[in-house]
Image: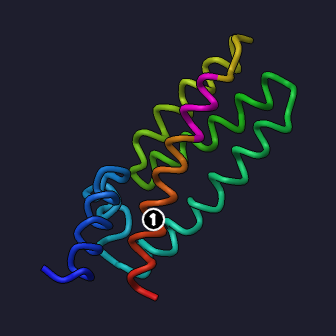
Amino acid sequence: MSIMEQYEQRASSAFASAIDVVHLNRQTMGDRNLEHEVLELFRRQARVLLFRFEALTSPSERADVAHTLKGSARGVGANRVAFAADELERSAKSGEPTGRALAELAEAVAEVTSAIELRFGLDH
């Protein structure tokens, strides 16, 4: 197996563990260009929302940001991100400390971001 084939296999495996490919394929009707566009929007939005969450102090505003990210993640099949955002939203709403939930969400976003970049890095 060539180095490129090994890289493609690794990228495909990382992507499949980070994104529900069947769900994403249904959402994008199998259109690879639309998939790329949707995932790129999600990648950017996830980073912005994480920064916004950290900048906010109001529990209700923080919960709204986590809720938005949860919905976006569900839309593209980023299930670990959606679960972590749900936990963060719950913590923010209840006034509990959000540090652990935020760290889990940041890790999940980093995993998905990396997988998206690996997948589409092959296309450029």
Residue at the spot of label 1: 116
Q: Is residue 12 above or below residue 31?
A: above
- Does 80 sit left or right of 30 as displayed? right
Q: Residues within 10 Å of mark 1 (few under 14, many from 20)?
A: many
- Does 58 sit left or right of 25 as displayed? right
* Percent of width and height locating residue 28: 37, 69
Of 11 and 2, the residue lying toward us: 2
In this rendering, the count of numbered labels is 1
**Residue visible at 68% across and 23% down in the picture:** 99
Q: Quadrant of residue 105?
A: top right
Question: In the rendered view of the protein, which quadrant contains the N terminus?
Answer: bottom left
For residue 101: magenta?
yes
Of 123 and 9, the residue lying toward us: 9
For residue 68: magenta?
no
Which amino acid type is shown beneath numbered disc 1?
A: Ile
Of 17 and 30, the residue lying toward us: 17
* Percent of width and height locating residue 57: 87, 27
Q: Quadrant of residue 6?
A: bottom left
**Residue visible at 25% across and 57% down in the picture:** 22
Image color mode:
rainbow
Q: Is residue 91 above or below residue 38?
A: above
Q: Is residue 103 above or below residue 68?
A: above
- Residue that extends furthest to the left in the rendered view of this protein: 1
**Residue visible at 36% across and 79% down in the picture:** 32
Magenta residues, start to end: 100-106
**Residue visible at 37% across and 51% down in the picture:** 18
Q: Main secondary structure of the magenta part?
A: helix
* Percent of width and height locating residue 50: 70, 44
* Percent of width and height locating residue 54: 79, 36
SS for callout 1: helix
